[in-house]
Amino acid sequence: MKNTVATFLKAKQEKSKLTMLTGYDYSIAKIIDQAGVNSILVGDSLGMVMLGHKTTLPVTMEAMIHHTKAVGRGVDSALLLADMPFMSYQTSVYDAVKNAGRLVQEGGAEGVKLEGGVFCEHIRAIVNASIPVVGHLGLTPQSVNAFGGFRVQGKSEAAAREILEAAKKVEEAGAFAIVLECIPAKLAALITESISIPTIGIGAGKECDGQVLVCQDMLGMFPGHTPKFVKKYAEIGEQMSRAFKDYIREVQEGGYPGEEHSFGMSDEIISKLY
């Protein structure tokens, strides 16, 4: 069954949990889709995971369109969402609508996600252009320089109230869901109770209406620091490393390719070639 915006809203009403994972290429997206996830998000986290940047800030519209198209070729049932990268919507409402349209028209996205609670006018305009929008509050990675690093947000009363009010405004602007990243679990629970659209948590506790993780994080494929909120469901990175080392060793020792990996030819034909 194809997941849509209606799937998300129905899940909220029925109190059934939603699942979302990031995807950046065809092969992994196909595996994720066939596993039955509700949504695949082509995150601007590809800047860090796929391109090796330290933040998401260098990611361009062209990169987002490229990866969204690749992921879309592997998706049949999941709702395909794409992040709007840094400076693709902050500059003006016009730019926001135009670039959201590019992600749909050129990239094949079925909805877009943008960060922050101060862009409600932009959200409203995108929704009015018949493009579904997901909001994103709390730790918004495109604001990492303003935050002074990747830090938990909403810990004080004032900061918590600001995120709560922003969630209500994002809902009012027409978003069909909100990602809540790195905020206290109790605050995320309050926000989830206070709005009628689904909350998707990442480092925001279990009371959200759904959860999202970066695929490479949960598979143990991304080297370096692992955030507290990440649960590794597999150590694919270690398995890949062992496989690569086994391949190198077998090639060097003559174990690969074996006869079963080679194509035959009759001795008669070979003798005529000498």
Image (cartoon, grey):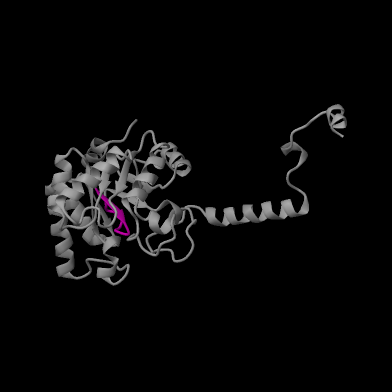
For the N terminus, give its image quadrant: top left
Regarding residue 174, the answer to whether it shows in the image is no
Q: Position of residue 212 (x, y in %)?
A: 34, 51
Q: Is residue 66 left or right of residue 233?
A: left
Q: Position of residue 108 (x, y in %)?
A: 32, 38
Q: Is residue 154 left or right of residue 1?
A: left
| Secondary structure mainly formed by the magenta segment | loop
Name the residue: 41% across, 36% down: 73
Is residue 54 or residue 63 the one in the foreground?
63
Q: Is residue 202 magenta?
A: yes
Q: Is residue 11 above or below residue 225?
A: above
Name the residue: 44% across, 60% down: 52
Q: Which stretch is magenta?
A: 199-208
Q: Is residue 266 left or right of residue 70?
A: right
For the C terminus, give its image quadrant: top right
Q: Is residue 71 magenta?
A: no
Counting labels gives 0
Tell me the quarter of the picture where residue 90 sits.
bottom left
Q: Position of residue 26 (x, y in %)?
A: 45, 41
Is residue 179 or residue 10 the one in the foreground?
179
Regarding residue 80, the answer to whether it shows in the image is yes
Q: Position of residue 188 (x, y in %)?
A: 23, 57
Is residue 72 or residue 207 the one in the foreground?
72
Name the residue: 14% across, 69% down: 158
